[in-house]
Image (cartoon, rainbow, N blue to C red):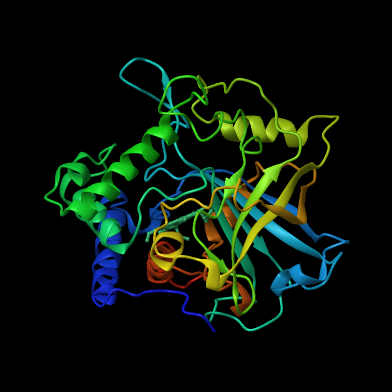
């Protein structure tokens, strides 16, 4: 098997520090330990049930892992969220009075999965696909994520984390910080054109009106690597109603409970590349490194259908809180790769343990 990852010698130590800092931040944000919410993405816009169907006509070379059986349908749960550290308005107001957007999340959990589990889970084996609405993550690697967390723990949940950019850095770290600043600018911008920073895409009127991306890479079988994406088939181009602080939930609920509501459909797509063709440092270990679609087109391997439903119930809200989505809930064929993904193993576990006060409810 070709070399897939390059692990810095002090990585385990850095990860341990990040876990401690994250837990400390969560305890500060939520002094009542019964009220602790996710370390990031605490605000959800809805937890919905869905069907995830592998394409009938999937070519032989793409029949891997959860995509092994063409036509197979998995039951799925999807949780839509804001990435922001705290629960607040879906769009805040910037200095110029304009709406300031944030990163949004779409976490998909396939049920009834069989295969070799990557980690012991608290429930049956699932395959989780976590995505954000940008093709890249804003921080390159574990070293930078540690620097960010040191700033957050020292300065509080400041936005943007100014200290991250003003700290003493070597030339390579300064170059990465420049890229992080550009990515954050592109996340907050509402303008796909004409003025820079260009938004990655138009801010969505509802959570189902944007594309979502894994950002980081994952195995696709033994010797290929994928990034994945969910792309809505019929996105609305309506203007976001940012006056409503929960407009993403409101709009999703309207879409799924309207008298003439129909299934909301996403194509689930992958970019698949031979492991031996990748530059490990820039295309696997750097989560800010984009695999440009022009060079590596996405192909559709499955369809996600979200049927009409009322998800605005106490029971569903509780389920959304109980569920644990992590890139490490999955099978060996789709192992997460790269520093940011290695870091996520321990941090998601710490976050879910902290927010599930014993006796722990069963959570997938
Ligand atoms: C490409 C990179 C990443 C993507 C696409 C991503 C995406 C997501 C999404 C969609 C969620 C919400 C899951 C849900 O609805 O329950 C989430 C949760 C979370 N993320 Fe990330 N994330 C990324 C990187 C990171 C990193 C580097 C960290 C820190 C090490 C992190 C920490 C967390 C934590 C603590 C949670 C909450 C876990 C829980 O309590 O269940 N994420 N992430």
Quarter where residue 9 is shown: bottom left
Q: Position of residue 54 (x, y in %)?
A: 80, 62
Give the residue at the far top of this rendering: 97
Instruction: Say left or right for 51 vs 118.
Output: right
For image coordinates 51% across by 35% down, the residue present is 200
Q: Position of residue 108 (x, y in %)?
A: 63, 57
For image coordinates 41% across by 70% down, the residue present is 342
Position of residue 158 relative to residue 279, above or below, is above
Q: Position of residue 95 (x, y in %)?
A: 30, 19
> Where does the C terminus fall, quadrant-wise?
bottom right
For image coordinates 61% across by 53% down, the residue present is 296
**Residue closer to the observer: 162 or 5:** 5
Instruction: Say left or right for 80 vs 259.
Output: left
Instruction: Say left or right for 56 vs 118.
Output: right
For image coordinates 83% across by 59% down, the residue present is 55
Position of residue 77 relative to residue 218, above or below, is above
Viewer can see residue 290: yes
How many marks overall? 0
> Where does the N terminus fall, quadrant-wise?
bottom right
Q: Position of residue 277 (x, y in %)?
A: 54, 68
């Amino acid at each position: 098997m070709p070399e897939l990852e390059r692990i810095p010698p002090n990585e385990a130590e850095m990860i341990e520090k990040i876990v401690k800092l994250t837990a400390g931040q969560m305890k500060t944000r939520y002094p009542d330990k019964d009220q602790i919410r996710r370390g990031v993405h605490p605000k959800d816009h809805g937890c919905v049930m869905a069907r995830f169907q592998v394409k009938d006509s999937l070519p032989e070379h793409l029949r891997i892992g959860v995509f092994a059986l063409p036509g197979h349908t998995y039951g799925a749960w999807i949780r839509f969220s804001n990435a922001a550290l705290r629960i607040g308005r879906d769009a805040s107001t910037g200095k110029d009075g304009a709406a300031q957007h944030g990163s949004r999340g779409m976490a998909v959990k396939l049920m009834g999965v069989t295969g070799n589990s990557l980690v012991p889970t608290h429930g049956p084996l699932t395959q989780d696909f976590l995505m954000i609405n940008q093709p890249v993550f804003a921080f390159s690697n574990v070293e930078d994520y540690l620097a960010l967390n040191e700033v957050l723990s020292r300065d509080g949940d400041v936005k943007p984390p100014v200290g991250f950019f003003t700290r003493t850095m070597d030339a390579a770290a300064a170059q990465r910080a420049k890229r992080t600043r550009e990515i954050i600018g592109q996340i907050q911008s509402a303008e796909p054109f004409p003025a820079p920073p260009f938004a990655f895409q138009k801010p969505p009127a509802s959570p189902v009106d944007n594309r979502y991306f894994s950002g980081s890479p994952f195995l696709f079988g033994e010797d290929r690597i994928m990034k994945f994406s969910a792309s809505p088939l019929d996105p609305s181009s309506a203007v976001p109603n940012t006056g409503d602080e929960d407009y993403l939930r409101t709009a999703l609920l309207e879409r799924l409970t309207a008298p003439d509501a129909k299934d909301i459909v996403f194509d689930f797509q992958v970019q698949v590349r031979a492991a031996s063709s990748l530059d490990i440092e820039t295309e696997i270990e750097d989560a800010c490194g984009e695999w440009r679609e022009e060079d590596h087109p996405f192909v559709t391997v499955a369809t996600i259908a979200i049927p009409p439903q009322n998800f605005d119930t106490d029971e569903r809200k509780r389920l959304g809180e109980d569920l644990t989505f992590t890139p490490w809930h999955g099978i060996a064929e789709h192992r997460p790769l790269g520093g940011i993904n290695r870091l996520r193993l321990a941090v998601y576990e710490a976050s879910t343990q902290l927010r599930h006060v014993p006796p722990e409810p069963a959570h997938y």
